[in-house]
């Protein structure tokens, strides 16, 4: 990993490897703030972006165990306006060229990204432009306001028709509020962060911890992931993390340390329990990393190739090993964040890996693939 620092591809990296859910390797390379000369440390705070989605999905499944919903319940039970959504006639149709909704999407489809929603940030379709123009996930909006805006925007496709990365997990965060009667941050703190001792994870970086907050960087040449050189990148999408804001995004709003997220991953890898704290039952965790997509459907991100990848309830699942990986990689479940915060659990191999950096974009970057290959080789 040091070569990525030396070649000025990344500013700093933190890596942790677990075998049988116990730490066997931890290293921190480079700088969390190049301009200030501050070293990357174990307590550095990262924007974890879409790693937030796994946390939100666990929160929802806590409420599933509480009997608040069924996976095949339709969304209009809590979002009545969603019963009248329209659907684009074709993927590139204009937003006013729509057809009726054939059926309302279910919670299962929402959690596995095949409910018909889009994101507004990864593609240039008419519906994605409308998401941006409507401010669907703007930092100044609340989750309830996001729900209202989505009620007036057509779906990109009929529910269950195809996998599409989307704002679904932000909608799931709104459902957590409705099901629990608490704000989304309060629910996460009471049911996940507090019990697991995730003391540095939340939606803002308090003033007393700001010195530990890593700078985010963007490459000078975004089209070449291995080109040297980077400069600070603004937090335009989510907004500043140093003060509260209305949007507490269930899809990408959290910050936290790699140590905090390791505790979260240890809980998942141990069947929902860690150090005497039961967050979920083992059967619920197993359901989360079991494929929930219809036969023949797989993950298909517009800018990243993810072959042989299925999707469970908030988690991607490897159906076949990638090049250089052993057969024990089958069944691995994982996800990552846009700025390069990655985590995976490979039950068959008994290993868990976490690799955190701050590079936009850093999702599915070569440094992560190399890290995984090294972890699998070391564990063989």
Image (cartoon, grey):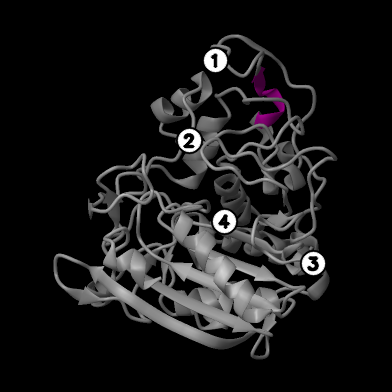
Q: Quadrant of residue 299?
A: top right
User: Where residue 13 sits in the image (x, y, percent)?
Assistant: 37, 70
Residue 181 visible from this viewpoint? no
User: Where residue 179 sits in the image (x, y, percent)?
Assistant: 66, 56
Mark sitting earlier along the chain (4/2): 4
Q: Secondary structure at mark 2?
A: loop
Q: CA distance from mark 3 to mark 4?
A: 17 Å
Asked if residue 12 lies in the magenta stretch, the reply is no
Label 3: how many residues lie within 10 Å, few (<14), some (14-19) or many (20+)? some
- 105, 149: nearer the viewer: 105
> Which portion, as a residue range, is magenta?
82-87
- Residue at image mark 4: 53
Q: Secondary structure at mark 1?
A: loop
Q: CA distance from mark 1 to mark 3?
A: 39 Å
- Residue at image mark 3: 286
Q: Residue at x 59, y 45 (%)?
A: 171
- Residue at image mark 2: 122
Give the number of marks. 4
Of the 4 image quadrants, the one containing the N terminus is bottom left
Q: Is residue 313 found left or right of 237 in the rendered image?
A: right
Residue 293's place in the image compared with 371, above or below, is above
Q: CA distance from mark 1 to mark 2?
A: 18 Å
């Amino acid at each position: 990993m040091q070569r990525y620092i030396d070649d000025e591809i990344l500013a700093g990296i933190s890596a942790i490897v677990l075998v049988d859910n116990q730490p066997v390797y931890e290293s921190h390379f480079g700088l969390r703030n190049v301009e200030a000369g501050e070293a990357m440390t174990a307590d550095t705070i990262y924007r974890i972006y879409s790693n937030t989605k796994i946390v939100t999905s666990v929160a929802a499944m806590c409420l599933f165990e509480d009997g608040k919903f069924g996976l095949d319940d339709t969304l209009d039970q809590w979002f009545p306006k969603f019963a009248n959504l329209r659907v684009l006639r074709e993927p590139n149709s204009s937003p006013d060229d729509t057809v009726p909704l054939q059926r309302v999407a279910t919670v299962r489809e929402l959690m596995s990204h095949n409910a018909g929603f889009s994101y507004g940030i990864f593609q240039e379709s008419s519906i994605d432009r409308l998401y941006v123009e409507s401010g669907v996930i703007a930092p100044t909006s609340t989750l309830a306001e996001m729900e209202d805006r989505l009620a007036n925007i057509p779906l990109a496709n009929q529910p269950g028709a195809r996998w599409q990365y989307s704002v679904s997990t932000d909608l799931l965060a709104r459902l957590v509020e409705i099901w629990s009667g608490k704000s989304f941050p309060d629910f996460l703190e009471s049911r996940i962060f507090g019990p697991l001792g995730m003391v540095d994870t939340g939606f803002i970086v308090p003033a007393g911890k700001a010195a530990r907050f890593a700078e985010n960087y963007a490459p000078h040449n975004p089209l070449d992931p291995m080109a040297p050189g980077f400069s600070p990148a603004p937090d335009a999408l989510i907004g500043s993390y140093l003060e509260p804001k209305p949007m507490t995004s269930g899809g990408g709003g959290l910050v936290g340390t790699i140590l905090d997220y390791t505790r979260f991953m240890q809980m998942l890898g141990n069947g929902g329990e860690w150090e005497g704290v039961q967050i979920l039952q083992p059967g619920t965790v197993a359901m989360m990393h079991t494929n929930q997509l219809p036969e023949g459907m797989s993950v298909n991100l517009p800018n990243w190739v993810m072959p042989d990848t299925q999707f469970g309830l908030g988690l991607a699942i490897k159906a076949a090993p990638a090049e250089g990986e052993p057969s024990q990689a089958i069944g691995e479940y994982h996800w990552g964040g846009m700025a390069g915060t990655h985590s995976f659990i490979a039950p068959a191999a008994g290993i868990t890996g976490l690799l955190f950096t701050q590079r936009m974009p850093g999702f599915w970057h070569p440094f992560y693939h190399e890290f995984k290959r090294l972890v699998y080789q070391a564990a063989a």
